[in-house]
Image (spheres, grey):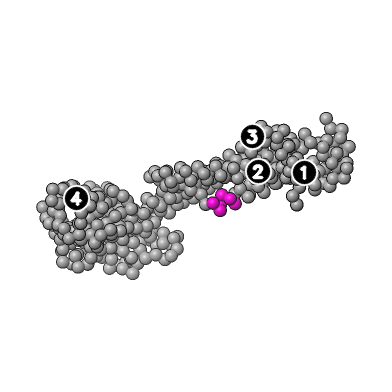
Amino acid sequence: MFDLERWQEIFEAIRKNKLRTFLTGLSVASGIFILVILLATGKGIENGVAKQFERDAASRISVWTGVTSQGYKGLNPGRFIQLKNNDFDQTVLKYQDQLEYKSSIYRIWSGLTTYNNENGSYRIEGALPDYQFLENESMTAGRFINNYDQENYEKVAVIGQKVYTDLFKGKKAIGEYIDITGIKFKVIGVFTDPGGEREEARIMMPLSTSQRVFNAGENIRNIAFTLQSTGNFNRDVEASNVFTTQLEDQLKTRHTIAPTDNRAITVRSNLQETKRFYDLNNMISLFFWAVGICTIIAGVVGVSNIMLIIVKERTKEIGIRKAIGAEPWSIIWMIMHESIFITAIAGFLGLIFGLGLLELAGPAIETEFISNPSVDFNIAISTVFILIIAGAIAGFFPAYRAAKIKPIEALNDD
């Protein structure tokens, strides 16, 4: 029931102790504000990490080679390991039931490309049709490489958005011919890539064509796969770990590499990297929660201390109330009412300022590992209500102490 007199008492007490009430409310509001900002930062880190892994398929497994660092079976260290078509074919044959997408890649890091009077130097990649999905690319015009292109050594090219912008200046590209290192290729598609301009400064062609044009024979630079998903992240990570270990052992055996040589063959799983980042992010989030909650607790303790001071200041008033028949619970509720009011107002103000700052500045925050920090409103509002409950508890103990004061002792208090 609404008690006007009770509210008048609360506002009168606040008016008499403006500075004390302000500082108490500030400590509570800052606790909520800091918690909101910390939770938003944690979410921003999560968004940034997710954005990093959007560049390629989330479950991509990549294979590349280097130079042996150990001698093995009479072979000296320092051998460069060259992957061949057969490495890819044997892997696909052995694990075909587990694989989703698959491609081997032959890469030229810089290929001079010309169209009419425009030219540029771009990365050239020969790949198989599945490479579009392994790279998480989207077609903005035309199509990607298909099996017919691969089987018939077609001189066709799929160009990135930056290549299209540089060479065609917005004009139609599909069906036009570009000159790549002196050889004509027909443009059949234009793609975009989540990795941005760097990834869009590439030209794709059939693997078979690239190997023939650049005299690569059976050589390939990299191999990439994704595995069939089980629908469970942890099981997918486990399956990826098993596959990468088996594949690394298989390739080391084929190329006579020491089992302990970690430089000659590298098999990296995006899922493993993703799990590491998310585990780290979970630890950061827990740390942020701990810091935020400790800040809020400090504010609530401040409220409790203020309520103790208020009880001390109003000892005679409480004694008079009890002497004329006030019930203990009415005394308790009187003290708790003020505690809850201060906590609620300060908590909501801290929440509003925190959410307001995020609304204004959040979308503008775009760094490599932090993107659009935000906080779930339901979590934020729930935190405030928990804070109000904590404020009620903080006010209860001083109020309970006040209710136990004997009228004669209260009236004699100095």
Instruction: Give the magenta-colored segment's residue range.
Output: 377-382
**Outermost residue, front side:** 4
Q: Is residue 14 visible?
A: yes
Residue drawn at point x = 10 percent, y = 52 percent: 182
Alpha carbons under labels 2 and 3: distance apart = 12 Å
Which residue is depicted at the point 85% across and 38% down? 319
Element under disc 2: helix
Distance from disc 2 to disc 1, alpha carbons, whole Å, reads: 20 Å
Q: Residues within 10 Å of mark 3 (few under 14, many from 20)?
A: some
Magenta region, main secondary structure: helix
On residue 5, the disc is: 1
Q: In the rendering, which numbered label is found on residue 23?
A: 3
Neighbourhood count class around disc 4 (C-alpha, 10 Å): few under 14, some 14–19, many 20 upward: some
State the image quarter where residue 159 is shown: bottom left
Q: Secondary structure at mark 3?
A: helix
User: Is label 4 or label 1 in front?
Assistant: 1
Q: In 3D space, how far apart are the residues under numbered discs 4 and 2 (Cα atoms)?
A: 63 Å
Q: Which residue is mark 4?
A: 167
Q: Position of residue 305 (x, y in %)?
A: 70, 37
